Amino acid sequence: MTTMELNLRKEYLYDLIKGMDEERLSKVETYIKRLCSPTSKKATNYPWTPSVEELESMIAESEENYEKGLYIEEEEMNKFFESMR
């Protein structure tokens, strides 16, 4: 990523922050402080990074649910979301 692209991304984030209400700004502020904290155990780009064991467990559970027919087709999910609007 070039310096210009990075600066444009920063400006975009700044514009988003300028338009936030106090409640959202507080949440963003808390997250940024936690993300930049030198005392954090590991720095990540995401609020949640599952371990290998957690991922394997979720995949196993998903496969089991699929075999039992406990899933929703994409078309059904789209209809559900459309009904929520």
Image: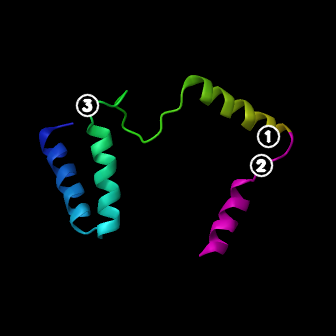
Q: Which residue is identified by label 2? A: 71
What type is the residue that disc 3 sits on? Answer: Pro
Between circles 3 and 1, the one closer to the viewer is 3
Q: Residues within 10 Å of mark 2 (few under 14, many from 20)?
A: few
Q: Earlier in the sequence, mark 3 or mark 1?
A: 3
Name the spot of residue 13 as percent of width and height, x first.
24, 55
Measured Cα–Cα span from mark 3 to mark 1: 42 Å
Q: Which residue is identified by label 1? A: 66
Measured Cα–Cα span from mark 2 to mark 1: 6 Å
Q: Which residue is identified by label 3? A: 38
Q: State the residue at coordinates (85%, 45%).
A: 69
Q: State the residue at coordinates (13%, 39%).
A: 3
Does residue 50 sit above or below 6 in this rendering?
A: above
Residue 41 location, quadrant: top left
**Disc 3 vs disc 1: Cβ atoms closer than 8 Å?**
no
What type is the residue that disc 2 sits on? Answer: Tyr
Q: Which residues are magenta?
A: 68-85
**Does the magenta portion include 73?**
yes
Name the spot of residue 85 as percent of width and height, x first.
59, 76
Question: Which is more toward the observer, 26 or 65?
Answer: 26
Name the spot of residue 64 as percent of width and height, x first.
80, 35
**Disc 2 vs disc 1: Cβ atoms closer than 8 Å?**
yes
Q: Is residue 73 left or right of residue 4?
A: right
What type is the residue that disc 1 sits on? Answer: Tyr
Between circles 2 and 3, the one closer to the viewer is 3
Q: Earlier in the sequence, mark 2 or mark 1?
A: 1
Does residue 82 sit above or below 59 in this rendering?
A: below
Q: State the residue at coordinates (31%, 59%).
A: 26
Name the spot of residue 83 as percent of width and height, x first.
67, 74
Q: Residues within 10 Å of mark 1 (few under 14, many from 20)?
A: few
Q: How many marks?
A: 3
Q: State the residue at coordinates (35%, 57%).
A: 27
